[in-house]
Amino acid sequence: MEYGYYPGCSLTGSAQRLNTTTKKVFKKLGHDLKEIPDWHCCGAFEYGDRNELIGFSKSNLKKAEDYFNDIVAPCPACYKNLKEANQEEGNRFSIIHPLDMFEYSDIVASTAVKHDLKGRLFTPYYGCVLLRPKETAIKNKDIMESVITHFGGEVDGDKVKDRCCGGNQFFINKWATERLSKLIIDKTRGDLVVFCPLCHMALKTFSENRKIIYFNDLLLYVMGETDKL
Amino acid sequence: MQKTNSNNEHRTKNIAYRDNRVFEMSGYKREDFSVCLGCKICASVCTVNDLSADSNPQELLSSLFLGRTIENDNPLVRFCTNCYRCTHNCPWGIRIPEVIRAFRETLGVESQFEKAFKGAIKIWGRVYEPYVFLMSATFMLKEGYMRYMPKWLEYMSFHLPHKIKGR
């Protein structure tokens, strides 16, 4: 199946890894992602005027309307803004986050396991906007835990599941991000598994030697696309 | 005495103007905050508690409702991370981070980085990261971000900016 794809600005730059791995995972599972032509930045959380902010995503939906019904947005901020705009426009599209795209059973059923995760410990960390507010939150709030444990991995991190890494303050008050990220790092064990580019950068910057992995990389490792995690 | 009265009048007008802008931008009306029960659940879950001792979103909402002054150095205005823990737990689901974002914009307290971010969107319709870093270079140098460069190598790539057609 072909899906509309909204990568968002960071996936064309610093989070390019999330872009390439999302495309690879979808391809592996038999789906194609096609970019919305000439998409505009979603504005992230940088605008005080809500109409201006949601207006960006409304214009992106307009650009998609001749081509797609279903749009995939991997970046949590883009996903939230696009989903809110769609709700205001009468839910004409289905806005999908990759974590909601595949039910746990689909991943399990369609994945030939090349590497299992036995003997490895992970902390799945969703960040804020994938889980809140509830109107735009993802449906599968435990999918990372389910997938990791199914493939033999051990999971930690329930204590920090609803905490914030402070990524939004990273380029305003970095001490604030450092303090909040360290609270997450210090209270968890194992490799940190994330889906948000800002969480990835904040946790990576302020951890001594913890591994920060995109969930896609973990899936691709299990599928045998890469031999190293 | 006359001067004091005139100062107070001026101040009240400023607050009224500010409040109207905040309501207009956040999409809320003053009466929307009258439902706040004062339960302070928002304050008990606020991420800013980990950064500052006196963060209280409920107080900010009631100041807005009653037309009281809110200072630029209010911890929420300075440190809100847009985590939406307050909204998630609020019995009315009030979207406090969006009210705070409107406040920040009204008060003009954007950082150099935030200005550069919006500047890129104005030029190209998208954020072009090299431009944002260049435009906020003095801030980044002064604040010591350069020491993280070795860790940021994996985030670096080169591409030219793409100017989009239409908004």
Image (spheres, coloured by chain):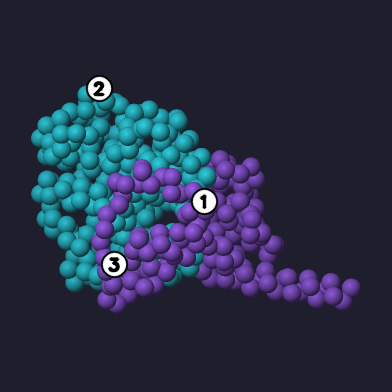
Say yes or no: labels 1 and 2 on the same chain.
no
- Residue B98 can be seen in this image: no
Placement of A79 over or under A110, stated as above or below: below
Give the CA separation, mark 2 to mark 3: 44 Å
What label sits on residue A119 in the rendered view? 2
What label sits on residue B143 in the rendered view? 1
Placement of A105 over or under A64, stated as above or below: above
Query: What percent of the width, then of the height, locates residue A201?
Result: 37, 46
Label 3, residues with CA under 10 Å away: few <14, some 14-19, many ≥20:
some
Say yes or no: labels 3 and 1 on the same chain.
yes
Label 1, residues with CA under 10 Å away: few <14, some 14-19, many ≥20:
some
Residue carrying label 3: B161
Name the secondary structure under disc 3.
loop
The residue mark sitting in front, 3 or 1, is 1
- Residue A183 can be seen in this image: yes
Name the secondary structure under disc 1.
loop
Specify the farthest residue to the top.
A119
Chain of the residue that carries numbered disc 1 in the rendered image: B
Name the secondary structure under disc 2.
loop
Query: What percent of the width, then of the height, locates residue A210?
Result: 36, 32
Chain of the residue that carries numbered disc 2 in the rendered image: A
Query: What percent of the width, then of the height, locates residue A121?
Result: 30, 27
Placement of B49 over or under B125, stated as above or below: above
Query: What percent of the width, then of the height, locates residue A229?
Result: 22, 34
Q: Amino acid at mark 3?
A: Pro
Q: Amino acid at mark 2?
A: Gly
Q: Amino acid at mark 1?
A: Glu
Report which colour depicts chain A. cyan
What label sits on residue A152 in the rendered view? none
